[in-house]
């Protein structure tokens, strides 16, 4: 099976439903668990694509988290070799940084279930063309980014102007979470209790909305990730 390199930056934020999608397309996740100190490879080599998952750190916290430099170097390698990249939450911020955009703290953190609106450009996008124009994913971020130069703006929310973008044919930055499972949401709420308390947010309210939101979200996410997996296969054949 072809490999997909996956940078996992905190234990509670894993591939979720992406894992099943990749395996159904003959793609095998190759995890680099940065939270456990596993070293990030310098090169993509024969990997079919790269996924960079979320984490509580900021892209500007390189001194506290030196692996961020290596993560951005690997993203840059994938871009140079035109290998598909999928950056989720922190991963989208790292991708935006590599592409020259500025990542800063937002006015306030966006955590919980909040609607996003797709742009007109998303109607023709390879990943999002079949998604509803508005839907409600899980959010868990405090940092925001400008749209990178040359990228196409794909989604926004009331609090965050740039929620998703694509650069070139296969580099996607998505700030929100469509990969979430019920367990991921539960684990994030239990792992980030201090953050929730600081923001005066009730984790139980997030948990109470799981059954209302998760199945529709997973249906949308599954299609999006299937389309990304197709990009990886096409890149290998090309």
Image: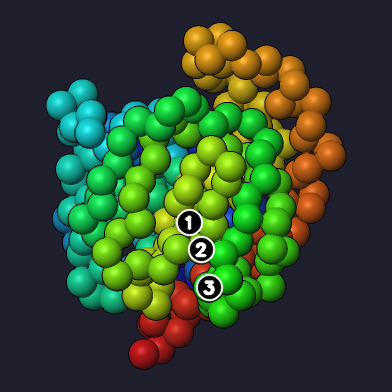
Image spot of residue 115 (x, y percent): 67, 45
Quarter of the image with the C terminus is bottom left
Point out which mark residue 154 bears: 2
- Which of the marked residues, 2 or 3, is nearer the chain's N terminus? 3
In the rendered image, residue 46, in percent from the top left (x then y), is placed at: 29, 72
Residue under the point 45% across and 51% down? 162
View extreme (bottom): residue: 238
Q: CA distance from mark 3 to mark 1?
A: 11 Å
Query: Looking at the image, do the residues carrying marks 2 and 3 touch, with CB atoms under 8 Å apart?
Result: yes
Residue visible at 29% across and 70% down in the picture? 150
Q: Is residue 204 above or below residue 155?
A: above
Please report whichever mark, 2 or 1, sits nearer to the chain's N-terminal start: 2
* Front residue of this view, candidates 176 and 46: 176
Q: Which residue is mark 3?
A: 121
Residue highlighted by disc 1 = 164
Locate residue 92, reporting x and y percent: 39, 50
């Amino acid at each position: 099976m072809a490999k997909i390199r996956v940078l996992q930056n905190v234990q509670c934020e894993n591939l979720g439903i992406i894992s099943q999608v990749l395996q159904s397309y003959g793609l095998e996740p190759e995890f680099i668990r940065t939270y456990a100190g596993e070293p990030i490879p310098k090169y993509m080599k024969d990997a079919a694509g790269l996924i960079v998952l979320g984490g509580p750190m900021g892209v500007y916290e390189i001194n506290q988290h030196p692996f961020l430099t290596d993560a951005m170097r690997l993203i840059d390698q994938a871009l140079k070799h035109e290998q598909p990249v999928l950056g989720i939450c922190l991963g989208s911020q790292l991708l935006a940084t590599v592409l020259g955009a500025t990542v800063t703290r937002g006015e306030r953190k966006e955590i919980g279930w909040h609607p996003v609106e797709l742009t007109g450009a998303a109607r023709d996008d390879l990943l999002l063309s079949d998604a509803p124009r508005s839907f409600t994913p899980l959010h868990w971020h405090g940092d925001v980014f400008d749209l990178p130069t040359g990228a196409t703006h794909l989604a926004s929310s009331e609090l965050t102007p740039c929620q998703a973008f694509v650069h070139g044919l296969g580099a996607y930055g998505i700030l929100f979470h469509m990969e979430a499972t019920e367990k991921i949401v539960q684990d994030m709420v239990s792992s980030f209790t201090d953050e929730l308390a600081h923001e005066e947010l009730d984790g139980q309210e997030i948990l109470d909305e799981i059954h209302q939101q998760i199945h529709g979200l997973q249906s949308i996410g599954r299609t999006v990730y299937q389309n990304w997996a197709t990009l990886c296969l096409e890149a290998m054949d090309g």
